[in-house]
Image: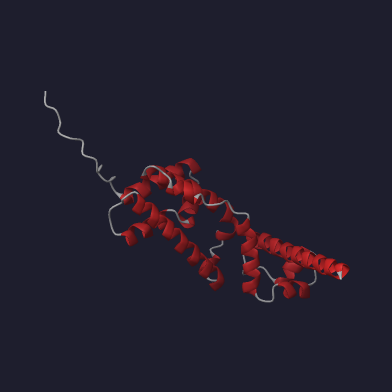
Amino acid sequence: MKTRAYNNETRRRKKAALKERIAAVTAELHAARGVTATRYADIARQAGVSLPTVYSHFPTQDELLQGCTAHVMARAPTLPVEKILAATDLPSAAASLVDAMEQQHLHFEPWKAWREDRVIPFLAAMAAEIRQSQAALLANVLASHEVQGTQRELVAAWESILSFDLWHRLAREHRLPRAAVRRMLVQCLLAVAGPAPASSSNPGPRRTP
């Protein structure tokens, strides 16, 4: 019984390792040529396995994309939510957000640059879920620093400023230095937020000479 259990576990690990290898190869091909231009036959050839083997692990494109994106996201830099929320003032929070999103953009750039979330439903749904999560974080940041205004409008503006599309346009298409892009994005976030709220503390009566 012990030998059978050992053999089953060995087979399970080998199967999981092969599935991960296929997902990794798929991620490389998607980065190089995009999802729509990558065929199952290309994946099989690159991974050194048969075509039926690829289909046995990923019968549908959605399952293939799920495995591929899981592989990519597992290696992405962690968004420092606690650091962002712990910022003592809005400029610090904005700078932390811009820095963190730049790291995210740099990691996901090879795949996002294809803009295929606009044409592939699975990627569109995933992008929408990520935006929803980011919107919740932005709303939390704005509320914690008592930013005045319509929250829905402020969150939409901040989300757009922090988006991959704007970062990519400035850093890649216009070839601006990344430090300059970060500075500009922070300035945009603060400009949208408006002036800092007045201090609630009562300074007391001013002395006259």
What residue do we see at 41% from left, 46% from top?
93
Q: Position of residue 108 (x, y in %)?
A: 57, 56
Q: In front here: 60 or 200?
A: 200
Coloring scheme used = secondary structure
What residue do we see at 48% from left, 44% from top?
176
Q: Is residue 206 visible?
A: yes
Q: Quadrant of residue 201?
A: top left
What residue do we see at 69% from left, 73% from top?
58
172 left or right of 202? Answer: right
Q: In front here: 10 or 108?
A: 10
Q: Position of residue 190 (x, y in %)?
A: 35, 47
Kindly give the residue lying farthest to the front in the view shown: 1
57 left or right of 124? Answer: right
8 left or right of 174? Answer: right
Kindly give the residue lying farthest to the top in the view shown: 209
Q: Position of residue 52 (x, y in %)?
A: 77, 75
Q: In front here: 17 or 113?
A: 17
Q: Quadrant of the C terminus?
A: top left
Total marks shown come to 0
Is residue 46 placed above or below 57 in the rendered structure? above
Q: Is residue 98 visible?
A: no
Q: Quadrant of the N terminus?
A: bottom right
Q: Position of residue 135 (x, y in %)?
A: 42, 60
Is residue 168 placed above or below 21 in the rendered structure? above
What residue do we see at 32% from left, 48% from top?
191
Q: In front here: 106 or 151?
A: 151
Is residue 203 placed above or below 76 in the rendered structure? above
